[in-house]
Image (cartoon, helix red, strand yellow):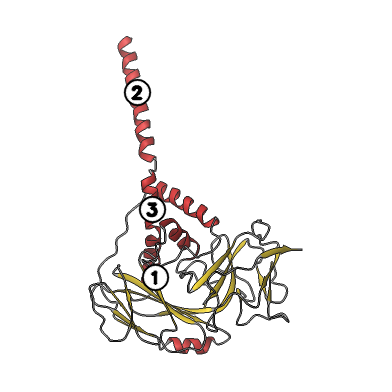
Amino acid sequence: MKKVTNIVSLLLALIALNVQVSAANTEVSPQRISSFIHWYPAMEQVKMRDEWLSKYKQGEWQFTGMVTANDRTVVTPQADVNYGYSWFNISNKPVVITMPKYDKYYSLSVFDMNHFMEVYVKPERPVVIRLPHQKSPIKNALEIVLHTYWGLAFTRQVIVHNEKEVMELAKKISIKGGGGDFPFIVPDFTPAEQKAGLKIIGEHVKKLPNGNKVFGSPYEGVGDLDRAAGVMQGQLGTQARYVQYGLYIFDKDKKILKGKASYEMHVPAKGLIRDKNGYWSFTIYNMADKYLIPNKENKYHISSYDAKKNSDGSVTIHVNPKGVGVNALPTTEKDFYGIFRVYEPVHSVVFPKIKRVK
């Protein structure tokens, strides 16, 4: 009997030990969470690239035209621009991009796989994208040096009731090169590590007053958590000196925005844009999936190009379930958040407040 008791005790001890070992194996270390946060932007870049390459060839252009609620290429898209995408690989030779002139806002952003970027607004010369050891194939070009083989050339052309004109200009945007095949490798993380990392990034997003510190080049010292938060909230966002972003999750009374409520925003006539090339645009998104909210009128944004102004030059924006009023956007009762973008901004933009109204 004593022998049986000892065997049972031994078995129970082994079971307890296995439970402890299993529990230890499921713990998520702080180092692994930090590593996930560091690699999160790269993993999102890889995900976007691979989805794009399932439909298009590297080194060619894809243009969206006017973005609508049907577009699922990137979260938090801007609704009043023609986006151009071209994923490329410069492992064998540099890429050369040329863009035609346009009298309204347009830009070329080049992203590496870590979501660092360089930007040219209205480039008047060809843009060469190369690795540090490569030489430019042409003289007097604007140059961007990447530290990853893969990258994304990303264009913005604002559309102001002239989509046909913009799409004709887009046909003249050229890209040469980009057909290399060297890989970009990201590490694997367990579901528990991903869940823990995403929770930290999501909490950090809620604390961001704007996008001033979440997007940048390799030379600007943007931190891992800030960069990850920027990618989570709006992948392919741009540096603050080119674009400043105001994130609206709460109203002026610190209450979360609700799709069944009504809101107003008063945009001042001056103090946002530093020169005539710039403009501002306000867009709302479904909080559930971060895409544009489908509506019968296809109304997704209000901008300084097409807003109806008050007598003093300011603009009053309305947001409510049915999109009632001048300069109004419909939520269709979907809980939402907003992004206020200022292109060619003043040094430090003071974003207008949004307030709940009856």
Which residue shows up at 44% across the image and 84% down it?
Answer: 122
**Disc 3 versus disc 1: nearer the observer:** 1
Measuring from the top left, give residue 87's x and y in whole percent. Answer: 35, 74
Which residue shows up at 32% across the image and 20% down it?
Answer: 10
- Going by the numbered disc 3, the residue's amino acid type is Phe
Q: Any mark on residue 281, and which?
A: none
Measuring from the top left, give residue 288's x and y in whole percent. Answer: 56, 59
Local secondary structure at mark 1: strand
Residue placed under numbered mark 3 in the picture: 36
**Disc 2 versus disc 3: nearer the observer:** 3
Local secondary structure at mark 2: helix
Measuring from the top left, give residue 209's x and y in whole percent. Answer: 56, 60
- Going by the numbered disc 2, the residue's amino acid type is Ala
Residue placed under numbered mark 1 in the picture: 117
Left of 207 or right of it: where is 1?
Answer: left
Residue placed under numbered mark 2 in the picture: 13
What is the CA distance from the residue labelled 2 to the residue labelled 3? 35 Å
Which one is earlier in the sequence, the residue at label 1 or at label 2? 2
User: Pointers 1 and 2 in contact (CB under 8 A)?
Assistant: no
